[in-house]
Amino acid sequence: MNEMGIYRLYKAVFALLGGGVGWIVGEFKPAFPLIVVAVIFIIYDAYTAYSLSSRVHKKYPDRTQRRAAKFTSFAFGKVISQTIPKRLFLIVLAFLVEHWVFIHVQVPLSYVVTGAICFEQAWSILENESSCRDEGESRFWRLLQHIMIDKTERHFDIDLSELKDGDRVTDEQIAAAREMLRRMEEQKRKQNENND
């Protein structure tokens, strides 16, 4: 094949690719605002998870699993590489079903799916924001803790549900947990001294 034939082949391939990209943009253009809204919610949820991790480490520096915040660049990479593509695929799939399957019925399926994704992320944002708050902080956060999960325990070496008695942690349970943590730290220190 001579140079002119290769040039024509490349030109045809790029014309087909350009046409395909143009068709995709034209076909899915109404879904782009929905995708942008969902991505904003997902990224803000990741930010609130980072804020929670920082609060937990600041409030309980000796009891957190790591010396730095638990939210890492790996966790954010997981949000970018897994969470966002899965949610966007759901929106695009709902858009396709809405426009190609339910063509005679007015079902705003892509809006419903985007609303469900945003609700899921908003719930997670409120859980992150209400977790690990001091008693003196807003009553709003304390009220939310009655109906939401406290994500603080994800940052500890122990499961806080073991310490709960009727959804309330007693002073005796807190003292017992502190004693258990002290013994664990003492054991770790002795093991480190024996290894040296």
Image (cartoon, rainbow, N blue to C red):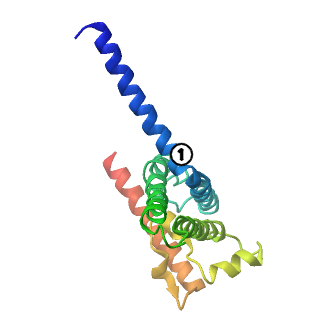
From this viewpoint, which residue is outermost toward the left? Answer: 1
The spot of residue 157 in percent (x, y) is 45, 65
**Residue 154 in the figure: left or right of residue 134:** left
Which residue is found at the position 62% from the left and 70% from the top? 131
The residue drawn where x is 45% and y is 81% is 162
Question: Label 1's element?
Answer: helix
- Vertical side of 56 occupied by 81: above or below: above
Residue 94 in percent (x, y) is at 47, 63
Q: Residues within 10 Å of mark 1 (few under 14, many from 20)?
A: few
Residue corresponding to mark 1: 26
Residue type (three-letter) at the residue carrying disc 1: Gly
Q: Position of residue 24 (x, y in %)?
A: 47, 44
Whether residue 72 is visible to the viewer of this picture, yes or no, is no
Q: Which residue does the image show at 45% across and 32% down from the upper left?
A: 18
Left or right of residue 102, residue 135 in this image: right
48 left or right of 16?
Answer: right
Front-most of residues 29 and 176: 29
Q: Position of residue 179 (x, y in %)?
A: 50, 74
On screen, residue 88 above or below 182: above
User: Which corner quadrant holds the C terminus?
Assistant: top left
- Between 141 and 11, the residue placed more toward the observer is 11
Observer able to see residue 160: yes
